[in-house]
Image (cartoon, helix red, strand yellow):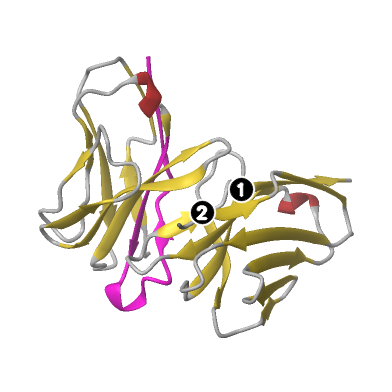
Amino acid sequence: EAQVTQNPRYLITVTGKKLTVTCSQNMNHEYMSWYRQDPGLGLRQIYYSMNVEVTDKGDVPEGYKVSRKEKRNFPLILESPSPNQTSLYFCASSSLAATYEQYFGPGTRLTVT
Amino acid sequence: GEDVEQSLFLSVREGDSSVINCTYTDSSSTYLYWYKQEPGAGLQLLTYIFSNMDMKQDQRLTVLLNKKDKHLSLRIADTQTGDSAIYFCAERSNTGKLIFGQGTTLQVKP
């Protein structure tokens, strides 16, 4: 089954404790991206990647890092989480030939206290 | 700049039609989307429309695109309680980024 998976689905952590949210897709997609969803703001893109070792900033990259060492994985790293990063995070992927059709993961709800 | 606007809330009675509206600013957008998010769930792509189309129909869903006014709408016929959700309008930028509206919460009353 074609899918985008994220782990963990729920995470409560404390300020400053480094964490990684994993994202993996099994569709051999080149394009992957991370969004955060906040009430009243919709979804905003954090980072995206066009292919292995190619990443670029989205609209709200501050406080986040990403890496793309393998085509299927695109982890989101919070080196020093802060309460304003409490949010619902979505990973998405698509083929570069068809970025009009993006597949979303189930979401990771992160709470930073 | 890039911006997508939606009204935040819509309430309808079961069996009525629902119309959710959206305006966008980027006239170069090639694709426009409607996503559905049920409580506690991820994003489900409902439908999308290519910018050279005016209308797209898919069962109970009708999407209308007015490029001149940069206005997109989603009509749900015979709205059911299972349609209660948040509906997001989105446009695709030339980097592949999706620019989302704030989301419209649809409440369907029995």
Tell me which residue sits at (56%, 35%) in the image: A39
Residue A16 x %, y %: 23, 17
- Whether A97 is among the magenta residues is yes
Q: Residues within 10 Å of mark 2 (few under 14, many from 20)?
A: many
Query: From what the image shows, is residue A73 above or below residue B25?
Result: above
Query: From what the image shows, is residue B89 above or below residue A22?
Result: below
Kindly indicate whether the residues beneath marks 2 and 1 are on one polypeptide chain. yes
User: For residue B100, which numbered disc appears in the image?
Assistant: 2
At mark 1, the secondary structure is: loop
Residue A54 x %, y %: 14, 59
Q: Residues within 10 Å of mark 1 (few under 14, many from 20)?
A: many
Quadrant in the picture for residue A87: top left
Residue A113 x %, y %: 37, 14
**Visible in this render: residue A111?**
no
- C-alpha span from label 2 to label 1: 8 Å
At mark 2, the secondary structure is: strand
Q: Which chain's residue wears label 1?
A: B
Tell me which residue sits at (37%, 20%) in the image: A83
Residue receiving disc 1: B103
- Whether B98 is among the magenta residues is no
Which residue range is magenta in the image?
A88-113
Q: Amino acid at mark 1?
A: Gly
Most extreme residue toward the front is B1
